[in-house]
């Protein structure tokens, strides 16, 4: 039975040789690639930066304001009477001298006729008085009339002349009253709603307005600025830190309530000499053209006013400014050895997309604007130039965002390094 059982043939020496060969192969593979067992070194983080360059920057301020008409006139009647006709369209443009209302002229026509009749009577009396005075003058020269008679005649003539002058004044007043029955526009502008209708009786001594006319082109915008800020601006202008604007410069723009920019620029006329005691602010008046009646009196606007020019200002993008726990401003700066450090700065106002830097930075320094989440103090970085090119006005990327792609030079070097690493790994695999 034992002789008929099949027995497998595995010589012991061959099994030992096979196990040894496998062990040697594994040891050889491990010895050939020791670097693969070690953890790869972290890549150097890339950060975007802009170089600090002094430049001429206008000193701009956004200030609140209200639109006010250039001129405003209330239409009133100078005479009393019955309103018989309205001759204007409400809300239309009227010219100075246009007839707006007509008051019943009949009573004033009668007054004029009466005044003219009185004048005619006084002129006739004057003719008689002159003839009498001339006659007595001749008789006095021939000694046939007394001096007293001549003096009485001369006085009567002067009295008649005065009465004629008084009658003429009464006639002129009657003519004025008759003319004032046509209520005319005192200024050119846009008239509002009619406050009286036909058939209304205007009582003597009434002071009620019939309508209101406002001149809207050009138009005023009254803006307010704090006294402290205005005085600081004047000191900067006096010291030369800010350059003055040229005379008659259109240096104000309006920001409408929908954040759109009013297409026409305005001109600053003057600053008020009295501050509001409740707010400590001064009113500045600006004149704007308003050809299409886009600005209405009482409208709230924001005025962007250019009050001077800083000829050597330093500004950085807003995302470059970081805040410490106590609220102080600082920036990250790339040093010459390609490491980064924090640097405190003093910031001024916001000018467009940038912060104006009063102190803490100098020309040529590289300020980080992108990649803050990747860096720590003293860390080695790979800086990428984010300075505006071809008219760009700000950094290419927002802060704390990785750039979509590096610039051409860095892209080329990065791709070349990746290709070289891949070739080395392939050659090592072939050797082992």
Image (tube, grey):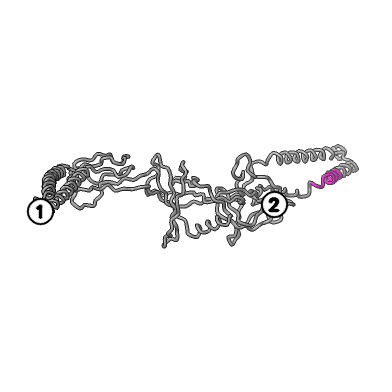
Comes first in the chain, label 2 or label 1: 1
Q: Residues within 10 Å of mark 1 (few under 14, many from 20)?
A: few
Asked if residue 94 lies in the magenta stretch, the reply is no
Residue 146, numbered label:
1
Q: Is 152 on the left-hand or right-hand side of 326? A: left
**Whole-percent x, y for residue 334 in the image:** 69, 52
Magenta portion: prevailing SS class: helix
Residue in view at x 30 percent, y 46 percent: 212
Residue ranking furthest to the front: 142
Whether the residues at callouts 2 and 1 have beta carbons within 8 Å, the answer is no
Q: Is residue 114 visible?
A: no
The C terminus: image quadrant: top right
Mark 2 — residue? 334
Name the residue at the left extreme. 144
Q: Secondary structure at mark 1?
A: loop
Q: Residue at x 59, y 44 (%)?
A: 393
User: Which is nearer the eye, 262 or 423?
Assistant: 262
Label 2 vs label 1: CA separation?
Answer: 121 Å
**From where the camera sits, is residue 362 visible?**
yes
Q: Residue furthest right?
A: 13
Mark 2 lies on a secondary structure that is strand
Q: Nearer the viewer, residue 111 or 287?
A: 111
Q: Is residue 239 left or right of residue 7?
A: left
Residue drawn where x is 24% and y is 43% of the image: 183
Question: In this rendering, would 353 be left or right of 144?
Answer: right
Which of labels 2 and 1 is toward the front?
Answer: 1
Of the numbered discs in the image, which one, if any, rests on residue 299?
none
Q: Give the magenta range.
A: 24-35
| Pick the front one: 165 or 12 | 165
Give the x, y percent position of residue 248: 49, 46
């Amino acid at each position: 039975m034992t002789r008929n059982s099949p027995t497998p043939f595995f010589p012991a020496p061959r099994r030992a040789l096979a196990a040894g060969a496998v062990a040697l192969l594994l040891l050889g593979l491990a010895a050939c690639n020791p670097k693969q067992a070690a953890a790869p070194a972290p890549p150097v983080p890339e950060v975007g930066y802009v170089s600090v360059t002094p430049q001429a920057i206008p000193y701009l301020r956004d200030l609140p304001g209200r639109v006010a008409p250039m001129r405003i006139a209330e239409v009133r009647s100078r005479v009393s009477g019955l309103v018989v006709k309205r001759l204007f369209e409400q809300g239309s443009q009227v010219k100075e001298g246009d007839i707006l209302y007509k008051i019943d002229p009949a009573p004033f026509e009668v007054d004029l006729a009466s005044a003219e009749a009185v004048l005619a009577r006084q002129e006739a009396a004057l003719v008689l008085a002159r003839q009498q005075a001339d006659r007595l003058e001749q008789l006095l020269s021939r000694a046939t009339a007394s001096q007293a008679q001549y003096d009485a005649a001369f006085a009567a003539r002067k009295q008649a002349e005065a009465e004629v002058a008084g009658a003429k004044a009464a006639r002129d007043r009657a003519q004025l009253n008759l003319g004032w029955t046509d209520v005319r526009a005192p200024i050119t502008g846009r008239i509002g709603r009619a406050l009286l209708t036909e058939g209304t009786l205007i009582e003597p001594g009434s002071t009620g307005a019939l309508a209101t006319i406002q001149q809207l082109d050009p138009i005023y915008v009254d803006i307010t600025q704090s006294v402290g800020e205005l005085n600081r601006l004047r000191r900067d202008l006096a010291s030369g830190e800010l350059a003055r604007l040229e005379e008659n410069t259109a240096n104000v723009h309006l920001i409408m309530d929908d954040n759109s920019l009013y297409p026409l620029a305005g001109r600053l006329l003057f600053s008020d000499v009295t501050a509001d005691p409740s707010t400590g602010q001064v009113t500045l008046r600006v004149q704007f053209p308003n050809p299409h009646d886009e600005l209405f009196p009482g409208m709230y606007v924001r005025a962007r006013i250019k009050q001077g020019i800083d000829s050597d200002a330093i500004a950085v993008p807003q995302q470059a400014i970081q805040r410490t726990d106590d609220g102080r401003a600082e920036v990250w700066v790339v040093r010459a050895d390609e490491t980064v450090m924090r640097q405190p700065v003093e910031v001024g106002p916001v000018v467009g997309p940038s912060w104006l830097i009063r102190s803490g930075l100098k020309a040529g320094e590289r300020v980080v604007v992108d990649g803050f989440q990747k860096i720590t103090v003293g860390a080695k970085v790979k800086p990428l130039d984010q300075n505006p090119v071809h008219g760009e006005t700000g950094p290419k990327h927002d802060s704390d965002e990785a750039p979509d792609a590096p610039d051409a030079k860095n892209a080329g070097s990065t791709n070349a390094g990746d290709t070289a690493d891949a070739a080395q790994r392939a050659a090592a695999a072939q050797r082992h």
